Image (spheres, rainbow, N blue to C red):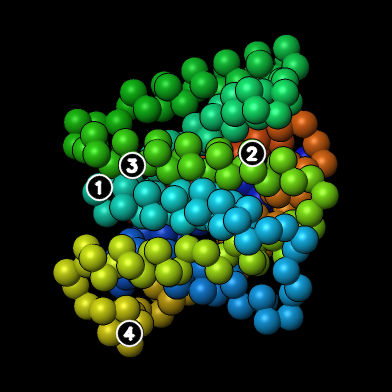
Amino acid sequence: MVLAAITSVIWGLGFVAIKFGLESFSAPQLTVMRFVIAAVPVVFVPRPRLSFGWIAAIGLTLFTGQFLLLFFAYAAGMPAGLASVSQQMQAFFTVLLAAVFLRDLPSLRQCAGMAVAFAGLGLVALTAGSDLPVVALGLALAAALSWAVGNVLVKSHAAVPVFPLVVWCSLVPPLPALAVSLAVDRGPSLPAALAHASWLSIGAMIYLGVGATTVAYAIWGRLLQRYPTGAVALFALLAPCTGVAAGAVLFG
């Protein structure tokens, strides 16, 4: 429970770090750099006993799809605090997908908790002003769904050590994210963005790569493998508490 709560706090602060990172980088560029940093341990971490196809599937859903869509949601006008709320739809998506495909059914008590949590997310969402673009909200929800699919894929390979899995899956996002950057970015190239990035953006990029990816996802994946999905996934609902509070303090 402590590990799950700590992971959610790390992710909650990550929603603020994204905002700082996007001050110097485009959404695809930040995705590239986040996972280049997260993949550094691949030099000394052996590949998990999993086919490249499964590594690619997990990397494309848990990492590439989730963060490209989320960063584009920010670029489209999604506030950091509300982003941390919208992403927690992944808890409901994860439990639903695990129940359908893995027969990992939540208990009645967990269903009651999800109902209360869903009502809470709905109340928070209703406070969003008319200035929230529908496109930003749609991208954020699609990111949450991608995260949920990745969670279920990790859950389905319970025998695989998670730290090597996270590191090797981090090799997947840089190339597709770089291709998206070359296709859609109209600003500076990635080398130019790196050369002129602020120290705050560089720090945010490192935090996202090391803390919010390598460390947090290794803990999270291991918890998903060892415990029922309904018990673990809902701890992510603590992330908005951190994200909303940090967004209020730093961005008003």
The span from disc 3 to disc 4 (Cα, nearest Å) is: 27 Å
Residue under circle 3? 139
Query: Quick check: marks 3 and 2 in contact, CB under 8 Å?
Result: no
- Residue 214 appears left or right of 125: right
Closer to the eye: label 1 or 4: 4
User: What's the residue type where badge 2 is placed?
Assistant: Val
The span from disc 2 to disc 1 (Cα, nearest Å) is: 29 Å
- Residue 11 appears left or right of 178: right
The span from disc 1 to disc 4 (Cα, nearest Å) is: 25 Å
Q: Is residue 116 visible?
A: yes
Instruction: Label 2, secondary structure: give it.
Output: helix
Query: Quick check: marks 2 and 4 in contact, CB under 8 Å?
Result: no
Residue under circle 1? 77
Residue under circle 4? 191
x then y, percent, for residue 216: 65, 56
Q: Nearer the viewer, residue 5 or 40?
A: 40
The span from disc 2 to disc 4 (Cα, nearest Å) is: 35 Å
10 Å crowding of disc 1: few (<14), some (14-19), many (20+): some
What is the count of numbered marks? 4
10 Å crowding of disc 3: few (<14), some (14-19), many (20+): many
Identify the residue at image location x=75%, y=63%.
48
Q: Nearer the viewer, residue 196 or 169?
A: 169
Query: In which quadrant of the rendered view does residue 166 lie?
Result: bottom right
User: What's the residue type where badge 4 is placed?
Assistant: Pro
